């Protein structure tokens, strides 16, 4: 297994990331979080269809709980899809699961949580990771902000305002080589919209940690490589329904 960058856990580096996310840009790019050979290996398995695993059909965010199997979300075209993998299920790809846990650890430290938060059944939140590919040119993800005071029809949690919450995007594609024109659009802390890959230099293997309450979308992708398009991994966290149920039972007893 790849040895991740241990310097990311040092206090000076965490301070640098927090300053960028919460005070200045609204995001921080961790360059070469994955080396190129590992990115190529993931792309070969997941984008070329070599993973032999059954994914169930679509579940709404509000339906996800510890009984939910790993599932597939299909997008506007047959090439648009997201493989949604729940941390509580057996991993279809142990290497990918290790990567998800490591990325989630960095977010936890930046947010001031225990390192393995959201990977344990006792935590308030539980981790899901999604390997997503977009090849269509419309809106794959409409403009929205998470953990902000606005209506969300299908939130992963209660969606109350929480300015410390961060999200992660691990890029598996190169702008200008695999896709162009669109991709991940993000409103920085100054309210300016930037396009990662064009306005913010990112490459396959880079991990972006960004402020969840800032407006973001995925749209206008021109796929230069139909097998890859705009491919990335995101890391949503869901309310721990099992823990909430146990707490309610205690309150009623």
Image (cartoon, grey):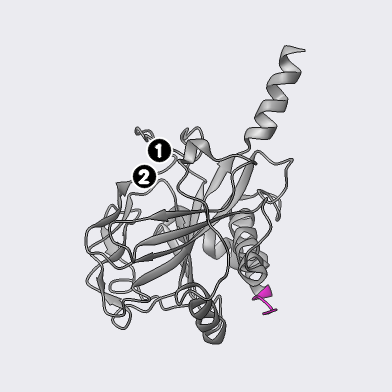
Residue 46 position in % (x across, y down): 50, 72
Q: CA distance from mark 1 to mark 2?
A: 6 Å
Helix, strand or loop at label 1? It is loop
Of residues 181 and 201, the one drawn nearer to the viewer in this rendering: 181
Q: Are the two marked residues, 1 and 2, in contact with CB atoms closer than 8 angstroms?
A: yes
Quarter location, residue 51 = bottom right
Residue drawn at (67%, 80%), measured in percent from left and top? 2
Badge 1: how crowded within 10 Å, few (<14), some, or many (20+)?
Answer: some
Q: Compared to 183, does 118 lie above or below?
A: above
Residue 70 position in % (x across, y down): 57, 53
Residue 18 position in % (x across, y down): 53, 58
- Which residue does the numbered mark 1 point to in the structure image? 148
Badge 2: how crowded within 10 Å, few (<14), some, or many (20+)?
Answer: some
What label does residue 40 carry, if any? Answer: none
In this rendering, would 26 be left or right of 248? left
- Which residue does the numbered mark 2 point to in the structure image? 145
Report the magenta residues as a range: 1-6
Helix, strand or loop at label 2? It is loop
Q: Compared to 59, does 244 lie above or below?
A: above
Residue 226 position in % (x across, y down): 31, 76
Q: Quadrant of the C terminus?
A: top right
Of residues 154 and 23, the one drawn nearer to the viewer in this rendering: 154
Extreme residue in the bottom direction: 37
Mark yes or no: residue 13 visible: yes
Mark yes or no: residue 162 visible: no
Residue 145 is covered by the magenta coloring: no
**SS assignment for the magenta stretch, majority:** loop
């Amino acid at each position: 297994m790849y040895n991740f960058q241990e310097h990311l856990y040092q206090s000076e580096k965490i301070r640098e990331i927090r300053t960028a996310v919460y005070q200045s840009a609204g995001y921080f790019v961790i360059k070469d979080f994955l080396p190129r050979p590992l990115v190529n290996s993931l792309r070969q398995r997941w984008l070329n269809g070599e993973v032999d695993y059954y994914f169930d059909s679509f579940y709404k965010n509000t339906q996800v709980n510890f009984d939910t199997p790993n599932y597939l979300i299909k997008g506007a075209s047959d090439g648009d899809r997201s493989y949604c993998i729940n941390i509580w299920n057996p991993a279809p790809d142990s290497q990918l699961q290790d990567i998800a846990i490591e990325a989630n650890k960095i977010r936890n430290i930046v947010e001031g949580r225990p390192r393995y938060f959201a990977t344990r059944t006792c935590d308030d939140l539980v981790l899901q990771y999604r390997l997503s590919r977009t090849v269509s040119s419309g809106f794959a993800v409409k403009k929205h902000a998470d953990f902000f005071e606005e209506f969300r029809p299908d939130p992963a949690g209660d969606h109350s305002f929480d300015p410390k919450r961060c999200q992660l995007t691990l890029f598996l594609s190169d702008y200008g080589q695999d896709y162009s024109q669109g991709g991940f659009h993000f409103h920085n802390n100054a309210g300016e919209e930037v396009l990662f890959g064009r306005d913010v230099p990112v490459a396959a293997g880079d991990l972006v940690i960004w402020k969840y309450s800032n407006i973001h979308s995925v749209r206008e992708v021109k796929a230069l490589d139909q097998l890859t398009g705009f491919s990335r991994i995101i890391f949503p966290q869901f309310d721990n329904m099992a823990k909430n149920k146990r707490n309610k039972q205690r309150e009623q007893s």
